[in-house]
Amino acid sequence: MKDFLIARLRRVIRRHQWLRLSRELAVCWVAAAAAGLGLIWLQQQTGWSSPFSFPLLAALTGCAAITLTIRNARRRPDVRTIALTVEQAYPELRGLLLTAVQQIETDDEAEGSYLRYRVVQQAVEHCQETGNWRGAVPSLRVRGVMAAQFAALALLMG
């Protein structure tokens, strides 16, 4: 039961990580597009031109995107923060998931108790009843941010 709860929380964590990475990449693409537009404006206003400016901008943008992706992959998720996100999306939990996460984190196999079992069991039941807590990080929000990221990338490419 504990493993089931952890697996469901991992799904929410992955969705949260995708959302955060998509946001960060969208900001990266928009900043690079703004820098590119700034270079174009500079060239038009002053006549200054360098064959290295746009390749350098592309290389810096690529490095920034790779850095953001690696940093996001290495970032250790805070299970309590994710549990709090789920609790905010499902107020009927009233602290149940946070308590279950605390019980799992401090779980000593030799010190199992009925209370610990019931808290985790109720959290698992709620997860199953509500469709794996998908409402904590809605698909529409994830898709919207990913669409914004790709739109920013298209702006950069243009």
Image (spheres, rainbow, N blue to C red):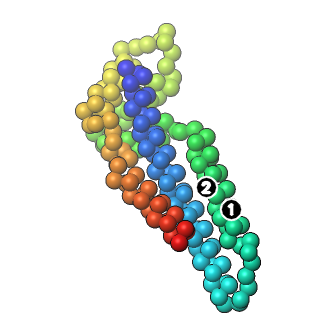
Which image quarter: residue 38? bottom right
The amino acid type found where label 2 is placed reads: Ala
- In this view, the residue in front, 28 or 153, is 153
Relative to 147, is 2 above or below?
Answer: above
**CA separation in Å, label 2 and label 1:** 9 Å
The amino acid type found where label 1 is placed reads: Leu
Q: Is residue 36 shown left or right of residue 9?
A: right
Q: Residue at x 35, y 49 (%)?
A: 139
Position of residue 138 measured from the top left corner of the image (x, y, whole percent): 35, 49
- Judged from the image, the secondary structure of the residue bearing numbered disc 2 is helix
Q: Residue at x 62, y 45 (%)?
A: 70
Q: Which residue is mark 1?
A: 60
Position of residue 28 measured from the top left corner of the image (x, y, whole percent): 58, 62
- Judged from the image, the secondary structure of the residue bearing numbered disc 1 is helix
Q: Is residue 68 shown left or right of residue 97?
A: right
- In this view, the residue in front, 89 or 44, is 44
Q: Is residue 16 shown left or right of residue 133?
A: right
Relative to 24, is 158 above or below?
Answer: below
Q: Which residue is mark 2?
A: 65
Position of residue 87 measured from the top left corner of the image (x, y, whole percent): 36, 41
